[in-house]
Image: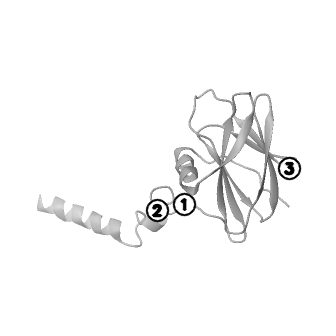
Amino acid sequence: MRKLLVAVGLLLLAGCSSNSIWSKDNDAWGTGTFPVANEGQAALYIVREPTQPDSPPINITMGTQPIGGVSPPNYMRLDLAPKLYDLRAYGPQTNSELIITVAPGQTRFLLAQLTPNGGAELLELSQEQGRKLARQGERLWTPEIYD
């Protein structure tokens, strides 16, 4: 019994040390930090809410470049140079446009959702809402964005 208590105590001490993999600094998806923008760039997360499993993906383009389809509950992360971007979300029947400007060091979240008229839209989310949705899914592959 004494050996068990000593082992548990040592595990607790190891978990609290600053070099532990359980430290708050390394907790990218828990309650600690969240992956932010690379130096000199902005991080743009496009997220989907968990919905019906048969919900179609929402295709996203930036200018004329296809970025990919976002299926629920997954997300995309785009590392962007600071400037103006023209984004489009494509639903089964129609699409909508959102023009944004990003700044260096900025992390922004957009919700991609289907509309009742068969379209899709992109809506800006708060940091808290966006991070919560990103944590519920997996990151999807996206192409490099070139200027």
Crowding at label 2, few (<14), some or many (≥20) Cα neighbours within 10 Å? few
Question: Which residue sits at x=58%, y=29%?
Answer: 53
* Colour pattern of the rendering: one colour
- Residue at the far right: name it: 64
CB contact under 8 Å: marks 1 and 3: no
> In screen coordinates, is 77 left or right of 90?
left
Query: Could you say where residue 66 lies in the image, as x and y percent from the top left?
Result: 82, 45
> In screen coordinates, is 29 left or right of 87?
left
Q: Quadrant of the C terminus?
A: bottom right
- Labels in figure, total: 3
Q: Earlier in the sequence, mark 1 or mark 3?
A: 1
Q: Earlier in the sequence, mark 2 or mark 3?
A: 2
Q: Amino acid at mark 1?
A: Phe
| Element class at badge 2 | loop
Residue 43 in which image quadrant? bottom right
Query: Could you say where residue 118 lies in the image, as x and y percent from the top left?
Result: 74, 28
| Element class at badge 3 | loop
Q: Quadrant of the N terminus?
A: bottom left
CB contact under 8 Å: marks 2 and 3: no
Q: Amino acid at mark 2?
A: Gly
Question: Which residue sits at x=68%, y=42%?
Answer: 112
Q: Which mark is residue 32?
A: 2
Viewer-nearest residue: 25 or 99: 99
| Element class at badge 1 | loop
Query: Could you say where residue 47 lies in the image, as x and y percent from the top left?
Result: 63, 46
Crowding at label 1, few (<14), some or many (≥20) Cα neighbours within 10 Å? some
Q: Which mark is residue 34?
A: 1
> In screen coordinates, is 34 left or right of 40?
left
Q: CA distance from mark 2 to mark 3?
A: 35 Å
Which residue is tagged 3? 63
Q: CA distance from mark 1 to mark 3?
A: 28 Å
